[in-house]
Image: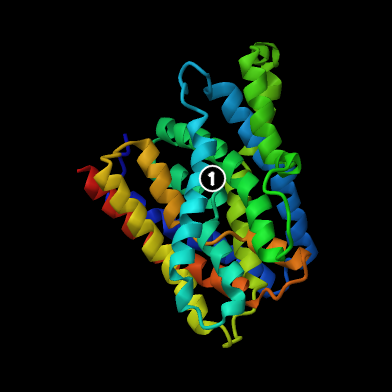
Amino acid sequence: MFEANFQAILAAPLRMFLMGAVGYYLVKRGIVAEFVLNTFNDLLVYLFLPCLIFHDFLTKFSFSVYENWWIFPLLGIIVSLAGFVIGEMLSFLLRNKGKKNQFLSLCAFQNSGYIPLLIAEVILKPEDASQMYMYIFLFLVGFNFLIWSLGVKLISEKGRSLVSLKDFYNPPILATLISLIIIFFGLNRFIPEIVIGSLGSFGSCTMPLAILVVGGSLAMIKIHEKRYLSDVGLAVLTKLVVFPALILAALFLLKIKSMLGLLLIIQAAAPSAVTLTVIAKYYQKDETFINQTIFYSHVLGLITFPIFLILYQGMMG
């Protein structure tokens, strides 16, 4: 059950702001160059986050405790598709119709990993946070599959199959799947404690470095272009207010008052995914609209995030 006091909920975005501000300042002042930030990001993706996933699964997960584990990858797909549908319904308000696909991707895909993990760490008791980590890691299996298929198709504007094994070829997803296989066959019993401890040590670096990288990434975004200002406002409003409000209403109507409900409201209230910038850059698309929406959704999300957490807690009453 979700239990967090008002101060803990307010502390979560404040902690994100302080840690992200350090990354923003270091990059903006040129103390940390872009290639160094990219190296930090690679360390996160290829080392620290997979180590955190391995450690937490191998020490805290079991199929008997998490019998319905398969639901969470499915939710990772459903939440993004719901955001896509809401974006489609509101896309008629766009002034720049040529940006519809980017608008849909910004509504569908949120920062579903680092920020939810930090929120869970700050507002939950350690044992509840560990449970939420499992939910988030499993959620990311479905989410990452969709962002690297549907998300790529939307931004690249090129035809591509929505189902591809290549969508699973990234270290965090592989770490999750391999962990599940190891636990299923009981092989985790043969892994030495010193290996588990080392995985935990590396994994503990994930949270601070992740938020520093997010802050540094925001520092590289140019926000002075006025061309898409009204559309950016629409995207931010949809992502930070309309979508989480609808999810909150659904949770209330369905009477979902558990850690599952908390996962859904955290994911729904999270700002647009920074990964969308990477996709746009790779396919050489104009990143201005995407970058500005990501920037402002992260900044304004510091205000809206705790509001929806407090509303959810009040709903649980």
Nearest to the observer: residue 129 or residue 259: 259
Judging depth in this view, the residue of 258 and 44 nearest the camera is 258
Image position, residue 23 (x, y; %):
62, 63
Q: In x, y percent, where is residue 85? A: 47, 58
Can the viewer see residue 127? yes
Where residue 153 sits, quadrant-wise, is bottom right
69 above or below 220? Answer: above
Amino acid under label 1?
A: Ile
**Colour scheme of this structure image?**
rainbow
* Residue in the image at 52% along x and 29% along y: 70
Q: Nearer the viewer, residue 295 or 106?
A: 106
The answer, for residue 200, to whether it is visible in the render is no
Residue identifier under label 1? 77
Q: Is residue 190 above or below residue 106?
A: above
- Tally of numbered tags: 1
Residue under the point 74% across and 39% down: 165
Residue 241, given in percent of the width and then of the height, sits at 38, 65
Q: Residue at x 54, y 37 (%)?
A: 73
| Residue under the image location 42 percent in, 70 percent down | 237
User: Crowding at label 1, few (<14), some or many (≥20) Cα neighbours within 10 Å?
Assistant: many
SS at badge 1? helix
Q: Is residue 312 left or right of residue 159?
A: left
Q: Position of residue 235 (x, y in %)?
A: 49, 71
